Image (cartoon, grey):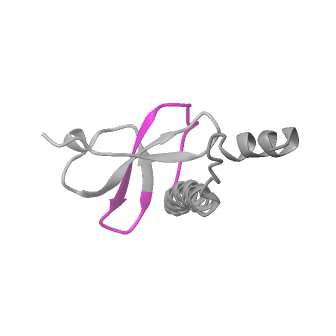
Amino acid sequence: MGRNEQSFLMEIAGPKIEVPDLLRFETARNHSLSNKIMSRLRDLEREYNELVELQRWNQFVEGFHIGFQTRLNQDYYLYESGAGRKFLSLIAPGEMGAAYTFHGRTRLHSEGYFVKVAEQQD
């Protein structure tokens, strides 16, 4: 055997060349991307729903008469009289009396809109 033939045989007998499973890597990458996109879409949907609810709440509050200067981060109570007059008040429901229907509590946010304040369960 000549020298070139011997060199060729040694190269053939070298370590096995592994071809990576490109399909597996591509599938994993696509799965990861899909998960990221779906997670972000859920976040955007939640944020959208929160903004829609914030808009609805502010439209609701705008229907109430405000007879005083509101302050940031102050809680206000929404009432309706028996005659149908809706107004904002600083007086809590326990102090207001039964003549008025309580419609919720709100707070003026530092960015100028009202946020709904959840009532605490006793």
1 in magenta? no
The image quarter in which residue 9 lies: top right
Instruction: From the viewer's side, name the closer residue of 122 and 42.
Output: 42
- The residues colored magenta run 64-86
Q: Is residue 70 magenta?
A: yes
Residue 31: x and y in percent read 54, 60
Q: Quarter of the image containing the N terminus?
A: top right
Q: Main secondary structure of the magenta part?
A: loop
- Indicate the quadrant containing the C terminus: top left, top right, bottom left or bottom right: top left
Image spot of residue 82 (x, y percent): 29, 66
Residue 63: image location, x then y, percent: 52, 62
Observer-nearest residue: 95 or 120?
A: 120
Q: Residue at x 39, y 37 (%)?
A: 90
Identify the residue at image location x=65%, y=54%.
19
Where residue 59 sits, quadrant-wise, is bottom right
101 relative position to 2: left or right: left
**Residue ID at (64%, 38%):** 111
Q: Residue furthest bottom?
A: 83
- Tell me what residue is drawn at x 58 percent, y 36 percent: 69
On the image, which quarter does residue 91 sit in? top left
Question: From this viewpoint, which residue is outermost toward the front?
Answer: 1
**Residue placed most toward the observer, 28 or 117:** 28
